[in-house]
């Protein structure tokens, strides 16, 4: 028996405790049948749920309190679990007869059979629905895993290039091409290890997502194309707006507070204005601009002080 069959078997063994009579059979039809037994044979009945809650009464049961543990009456069971009880008595002893008792026994068996079929149909429908949802979820996860970088959730290199080619094919201009590189990622890897250097990459990626949202750039394409390198495409964005985006990204990194991490990024931005230009060439220029920005940042006094501060904290 495979795992799915085992899971379903366990499910139907357990879930009947979650069902009430109204979920399994028509209470109105049951009321009509039991009422007819009362009229025809003087057979009085009281139906209650598994906890003793009264569902219907046909006859005089004034002052009667069902004791479903010690005096359970006639049990209606589904998959070995009681779902309700039927208590019976006659208006007077002389009315007690085999025909009425046989009819009641047959009806109880009918209720049990119908209830079990109703229960199984309901559980099968719910199980199938859950399986379909799981299949959809699994399919999404497979697709997501194929398209997205597992560490950051951004597009991986192949799918970023795929989106880039699509924008190129559609001739959407202007489009800003931004190259983002983490400054001194190696420093954190050497001094704090892989776990913290990975956290630095995730932190920068999260800042990148946050800044993109805050700038209202819903059509942006974000990708992690190498270890500490990110590419961003900003369709229909002019040079000034793209420049503000890069400034906000760098400021958000500097404003980030952490006992260990001190994220900093260099950015290079080039605007594609000609549909004949290729993004490959544009990003080549953006990388060159990023390297110039990196040289400027790493030679600034503020950056050196910030990095030295973390170097000293490492040696404590």
Image (tube, rainbow, N blue to C red):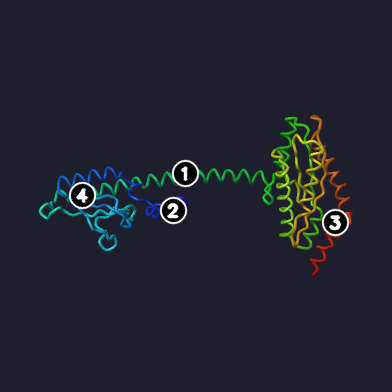
Residue at numbered disc 2 = 6
Q: CA distance from mark 2 to mark 3?
A: 60 Å
Q: CA distance from mark 4 to mark 1?
A: 37 Å
N-terminal of the pair, mark 2 or mark 1, is 2
Q: Secondary structure at mark 1?
A: helix
Q: Secondary structure at mark 3?
A: helix
Rendered location of residue 143, percent (x, y): 62, 43
The mark total stands at 4
Q: Nearer the viewer, mark 4 or mark 3?
A: 3
Say if mark 2 contacts mark 4, CB within 8 Å: no
Q: Furthest residue to the left?
A: 94
Q: Residue at x 69, y 46 (%)?
A: 154
Q: Furthest residue to the front?
A: 62
234 to the left or right of 94: right
N-terminal of the pair, mark 4 or mark 1, is 4
Residue at numbered disc 3 = 303
N-terminal of the pair, mark 2 or mark 3, is 2
Q: Secondary structure at mark 4?
A: helix
Rendered location of residue 53, percent (x, y): 31, 55
Q: Which mark is residue 148?
A: none
Say if mark 4 contacts mark 3, CB within 8 Å: no
Residue at numbered disc 1 = 129
Q: Residue at x 29, y 62 (%)?
A: 69
Q: In front: 105, or 146?
A: 105
20 to the left or right of 214: left
Q: Which mark is residue 104?
A: 4
């Amino acid at each position: 028996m495979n795992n799915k069959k085992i899971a379903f078997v366990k499910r139907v063994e357990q879930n009947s405790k979650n069902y009430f009579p109204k979920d399994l059979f028509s209470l109105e039809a049951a009321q009509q049948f039991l009422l007819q037994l009362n009229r025809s044979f003087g057979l009085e009945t009281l139906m209650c749920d598994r906890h003793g809650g009264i569902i219907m009464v046909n006859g005089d049961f004034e002052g009667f309190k069902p004791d479903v543990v010690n005096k359970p009456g006639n049990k209606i069971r589904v998959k070995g679990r009681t779902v309700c009880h039927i208590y019976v008595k006659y208006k007077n002893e002389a009315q007690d007869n085999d025909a009425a008792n046989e009819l009641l026994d047959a009806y109880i068996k009918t209720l049990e059979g119908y209830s079990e079929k109703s229960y199984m149909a309901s559980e099968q429908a719910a199980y199938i629905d859950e399986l379909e949802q799981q299949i959809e979820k699994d399919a999404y996860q497979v697709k997501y895993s194929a398209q997205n970088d597992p560490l950051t959730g951004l597009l991986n290199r192949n799918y970023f290039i795929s989106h880039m080619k699509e924008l190129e094919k559609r001739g959407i201009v202007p489009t800003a091409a931004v190259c983002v590189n983490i400054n001194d990622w190696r420093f954190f890897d050497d001094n704090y290890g892989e776990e913290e250097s990975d956290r630095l990459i995730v932190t920068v990626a999260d800042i990148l997502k946050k800044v993109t949202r805050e700038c209202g750039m819903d059509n942006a394409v974000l990708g992690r194309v190498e270890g500490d390198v990110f590419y961003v495409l900003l369709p229909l964005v002019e040079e000034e707006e793209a420049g503000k985006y890069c400034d906000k990204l760098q400021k958000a990194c500097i404003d980030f507070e952490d006992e260990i991490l001190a994220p900093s990024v260099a950015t290079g931005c080039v605007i594609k204005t000609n549909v004949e230009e290729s993004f490959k060439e544009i990003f080549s220029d953006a990388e060159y601009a990023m390297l110039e920005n990196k040289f400027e940042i790493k030679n600034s006094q503020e950056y050196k002080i910030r990095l030295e501060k973390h170097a000293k904290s490492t040696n404590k």
